[in-house]
Image (cartoon, rainbow, N blue to C red):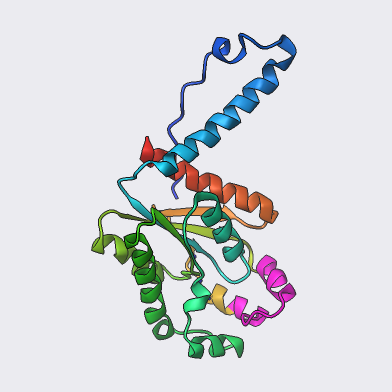
């Protein structure tokens, strides 16, 4: 299923002066007031950033092997930031789906047209006015990721980001084994790990997330990293 770091430091804001936050508050409420104000300021900042025109449009690809939680994480990011969501599995041909259902790994040849279609569909959504789009795509090999990166050559206003969801094979095998009604069986997870090329250090457009934690932690971390990237651009 192809549905796939250096850390980026977000520019910080100077802390508000204690007087402006607490001058009219009782001493016992100072701590909670600071926390509330900080949270509200952060929320307002992200809302304002989404409302402002950006010099770039973004394609966010949520990547990783079967069972890593691509759909859950991608839907969360798309909903939180008002971006259209593209489910990569929906763009596989019937032949590809049947191969995966019967435990036959896809070849490179099976994937090229599919990857190109995902890239073109992402660019189409941006051309229709979206400031960003979120896509699920396993992108197991670097050359698969490079197919998507071509979008930035076609349009210099597009920035590509990969959110790589990382976990040991045994964790993903357990998760896939528990799924019901999905064509990707547990026997396909190992085949994906057999060809997996984890993003290398020189792939600067990749954010890596440990998904061996709870899904709520993963969703919060992924969204926070997306916002960190956006904050750097809007600074």
Left or right of 122? Residue 166 is right
Asked if the stretch drawn in magenta spans residue 178, the answer is yes
Residue at the (44%, 55%) spot, across then down: 206
Residue at the (68%, 19%) spot, across then down: 31
Left or right of 200? Residue 215 is right
Residue 181, picture quadrant: bottom right
Residue at the (25%, 62%) spot, across then down: 153
Residue 214, picture quadrant: bottom right
Q: Position of residue 210 (x, y in %)?
A: 60, 54
Q: Position of residue 151 (x, y in %)?
A: 31, 64
Asked if the stretch drawn in magenta spans residue 85, the answer is no
Q: Position of residue 120 (x, y in %)?
A: 34, 71
Q: Position of residue 93 (x, y in %)?
A: 47, 85
Vertical placement of residue 16 versus 133, above or below: above
Of 196 and 25, nearer the camera is 25
Vertical placement of residue 87 versus 9, above or below: below
Is residue 203 visible to the viewer in this orientation of the structure?
Answer: no
Vertical placement of residue 215 versus 27, above or below: below
Residue 180, picture quadrant: bottom right
Give the residues drawn in magenta, as a range: 170-190
| Quadrant location, the C terminus | top left
Left or right of 132? Residue 223 is right
Main secondary structure found in the magenta portion: helix
Residue at the (61%, 47%) spot, across then down: 220
Of 54 and 98, nearer the camera is 54
């Amino acid at each position: 299923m192809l549905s796939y770091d250096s850390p980026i430091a977000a520019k910080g804001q100077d802390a508000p002066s204690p007087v402006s936050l607490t001058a009219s508050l009782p001493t016992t409420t100072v701590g909670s007031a600071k926390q509330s104000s900080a949270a509200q300021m952060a929320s307002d900042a992200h809302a304002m950033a989404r409302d402002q025109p950006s010099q770039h449009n973004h394609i966010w690809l949520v990547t990783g092997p079967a069972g890593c939680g691509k759909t859950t994480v991608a839907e969360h990011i798309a909903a939180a930031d008002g971006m259209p969501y593209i489910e990569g599995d929906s763009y596989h041909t019937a032949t590809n789906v049947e191969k995966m259902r019967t435990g036959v790994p896809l070849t490179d040849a099976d994937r090229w047209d599919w990857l190109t279609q995902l890239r073109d569909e992402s660019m189409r959504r941006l051309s229709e006015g979206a400031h960003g789009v979120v896509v699920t795509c396993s992108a197991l090999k670097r050359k698969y990721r490079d197919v998507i990166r071509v979008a930035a050559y076609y349009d210099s206003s597009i920035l590509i980001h990969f959110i790589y969801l990382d976990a040991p094979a045994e964790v993903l095998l357990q998760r896939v084994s528990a799924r019901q009604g999905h064509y990707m069986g547990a026997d396909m997870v190992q085949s994906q790990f057999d060809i997996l090329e984890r993003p290398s250090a020189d792939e600067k457009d990749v954010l890596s997330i440990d998904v061996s934690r709870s899904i709520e932690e993963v969703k919060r971390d992924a969204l926070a990293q997306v916002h960190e990237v956006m904050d750097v651009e809007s600074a």
